[in-house]
Image (cartoon, rainbow, N blue to C red):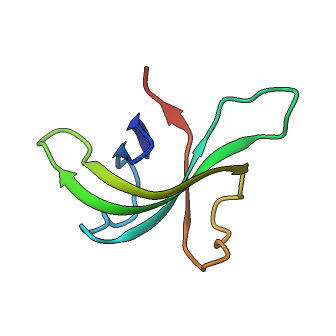
Amino acid sequence: MVTENIGKDGMLMRWRSEAALPKIGDQMVVQVELPVNHGFRPKCIHCQTVVAGISRREGSDPLLALSVSSMEFRDIQPPGKPGIDGSEMIPVTEWLA
């Protein structure tokens, strides 16, 4: 996934995954990797989200509008390792300017 836009209450993500596209109402845990600062360990913004909308245009990857219920800074969690609540971690590594 690629972060298109992010704010305190929501984010817009471009779905570039081979995994099945989530449905509106699905809960997702998203880790947005932050740029590396050599004075600290790698960090991310850990977000508990709900899919609020999906936009599909021909010839383009789908866009997911995610409503953010919780957002906190954390050390990066390895992909594929389930969170404390058993939810899937989805790493987001690309930022668009």
User: Residue 5: where, in percent of width, then height?
Assistant: 38, 34
Quarter of the image where the C terminus is located: top left
Residue drawn where x is 68% and y is 69% of the image: 81
Relative to 38, 19 lies left or right: left
The single residue placed furthest to the right in the displayed view is: 39
Residue drawn where x is 85% and y is 26% of the image: 38
Residue drawn where x is 55% and y is 74% of the image: 87
The single residue placed furthest to the left in the displayed view is: 58
The single residue placed furthest to the bottom in the displayed view is: 86
User: Residue 44: where, in percent of width, then height?
Assistant: 65, 45
Relative to 3, 24 lies left or right: left
Q: Nearer the viewer, residue 52 or 70?
A: 70
Residue drawn where x is 34% and y is 67% of the image: 20
How many marks on residues? 0
Placement of 79 over or under 85, stated as above or below: above
Placement of 86 over or under 94, stated as above or below: below
Placement of 2 over or under 17, stated as above or below: above
Q: Nearer the viewer, residue 11 or 23?
A: 11
User: Residue 42: where, in percent of width, then height?
Assistant: 77, 40
User: Residue 67: where, in percent of width, then height?
Assistant: 35, 56
Question: In which quadrant of the rendered view does residue 28 lie?
Answer: bottom left
